[in-house]
Image: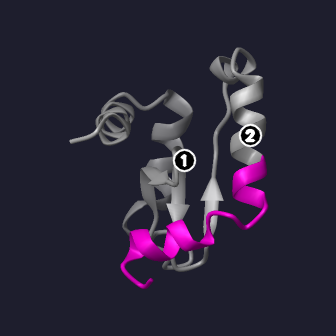
Amino acid sequence: MDELQHRARQLRRNMTDAEQTLWRRIRNRQLLNAKFRRQFILGSYIVDFVCLEQRLVIEIDGGQHLQNKSYDDKRSAYLTAGVCSDSILESSGAG
């Protein structure tokens, strides 16, 4: 298991209160029958939640993100530029 996979697993086990609250509401296709995954690897980033079918990423940025603004800006640019579309298809097995 590489370092990014290990980190994603740690994040899944130690979700913030906000992440836990949202996860309880979107898991098991509770929201518009959409399948969400949590702490999912896209490229070299781990996103909080992703719906591969809809190509939707949800990030919950708490106080810890104030310390990593540069990293968050790069991640946001990567995700919003459509650069990750190939990663999404590869991760879903559709690519």
The quadrant of the picture occupied by the C terminus is: bottom left
Question: How far is disc 1 from disc 2 in space, using C-alphas?
Answer: 13 Å
Q: Mark 1 belongs to which amino acid?
A: Val
Up-down relation of residue 67 to residue 11 (above or below): above
Name the residue furthest top: 67
- The residue where tag 2 is placed is 74
Residue 47, horizontal then vertical, whole percent:
54, 47
Q: Mark 2 belongs to which amino acid?
A: Lys
Residue depicted at x 32% and y 42%: 5
- The residue where tag 1 is placed is 47
Residues shaded magenta? 77-95
Q: Quadrant of residue 31?
A: bottom right
Residue depicted at x 49% and y 77%: 89
Q: Is residue 32 covered in magenta?
A: no
Looking at the rendered structure, the secondary structure element under dot 1 is: strand
Residue 18, horizontal then vertical, whole percent:
56, 34
Residue 63, horizontal then vertical, whole percent:
68, 18
Q: Nearer the viewer, mark 1 or mark 2?
A: 2
Count of all numbered marks drawn on residues in the image: 2
Residue depicted at x 56% and y 73%: 86
The quadrant of the picture occupied by the N terminus is: top left
Checking the image for residue 12, the label placed there is none
In the image: residue 12, left or right of residue 58? left
Up-down relation of residue 81 to residue 20 (above or below): below
Q: How is the image coloured?
A: one colour
Residue 11, horizontal then vertical, whole percent:
39, 33
Residue 31 showing in the rendered view: no
Q: Residues within 10 Å of mark 1 (few under 14, many from 20)?
A: many
Looking at the rendered structure, the secondary structure element under dot 2 is: helix
Is the stretch drawn in magenta largely helix, strand or loop? Answer: helix
* Cβ atoms at labels 1 and 2 below 8 Å apart: no
